[in-house]
Image: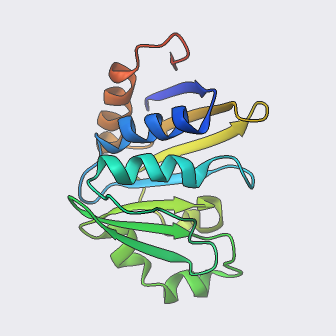
Amino acid sequence: MSASIVIGTASADETRELGGALGALLGAGDVVALRGELGAGKTVLAQGIAVALGFDGYVSSPTFVIVNEYRGLVDIHHVDLYRISDEAEIDDLGYRELFFGDGVALVEWAGRGSSFLPDDRVDVHIDSAGRERRIFTITASGPRSEVIVRGLEASQTTSEATSI
C-alpha cells in the first residue's frame, strides 16, 4: 500500500511553505512528478522545494527552456514537459541523467512523460479550489517515496492534512 496525503493551501505563500516541507525531506535521486492545470501552482511549489534544498535564487517556470538547473545542497533539475510533443524529445533531453541521477528532479506536466519517470517517485496532483486555494494530493509510488510522504504527513500540524 502506498502512502497518500491531501493538503489544502489558501495562498501562494502557503504553497511555498508546503514546498519547503516537502523539499526538506528530499535528497539525491528523488523525483517529484507535478501534475495540474496551467496556473495550478506547480512552479510555486517548486520554489519552496528549491529553497528547502538550499537554492537562494529565483525559481522560474522552465516552460520555454524545458530544463532549469539550480545548485543547492544537491543539484535541482526543474523540468517542464508541457511543450514536449513526442517521446523522442524526452529521450533527447537526457532524461536518464535528469530522472535517475544524483540530483532532485522536479517534473512539471509529468503526465506527458510518465513512462520515462522512475517507478519510485512522489506524485503531486494539484487542483485549483478558487482564486488562490489549492488542494494537493501527494502520493508515494515506492519505498523511498513512501518515507517522504510519511515524513510530510508527520510535519503537517494543520487540520487540512488528511492521510489516505
- Quadrant hosting residue 130: top right
Q: Is residue 43 above or below residue 24?
A: below
Q: Is residue 161 above or below residue 58?
A: above
Q: Is residue 20 above or below residue 114?
A: above
Q: Nearer the viewer, residue 38 or 2?
A: 38
Residue at the location (53% across, 32% down)?
Answer: 14
Residue at the location (29% across, 34% down)?
Answer: 147
The image's colouring method is rainbow
Left or right: 1 in relation to 7 = left
Residue lying farthest top?
A: 159
Residue at the location (31% across, 46% down)?
Answer: 52
Left or right: 53 in relation to 116 = left
Q: Position of residue 140 (x, y in %)?
A: 43, 39
Q: Quadrant of the N terminus?
A: top left
Residue at the location (56% across, 55% down)?
Answer: 43
- Total marks shown come to 0
Residue lying farthest left?
A: 73
Q: Nearer the viewer, residue 144 or 61?
A: 61
Q: Position of residue 158 (x, y in %)?
A: 47, 13
Q: Nearer the viewer, residue 151 or 68?
A: 68
Q: Position of residue 89 (x, y in %)?
A: 59, 86
Residue lying farthest front?
A: 57
Q: Is residue 80 above or below residue 30?
A: below
Q: Position of residue 17 (x, y in %)?
A: 44, 35
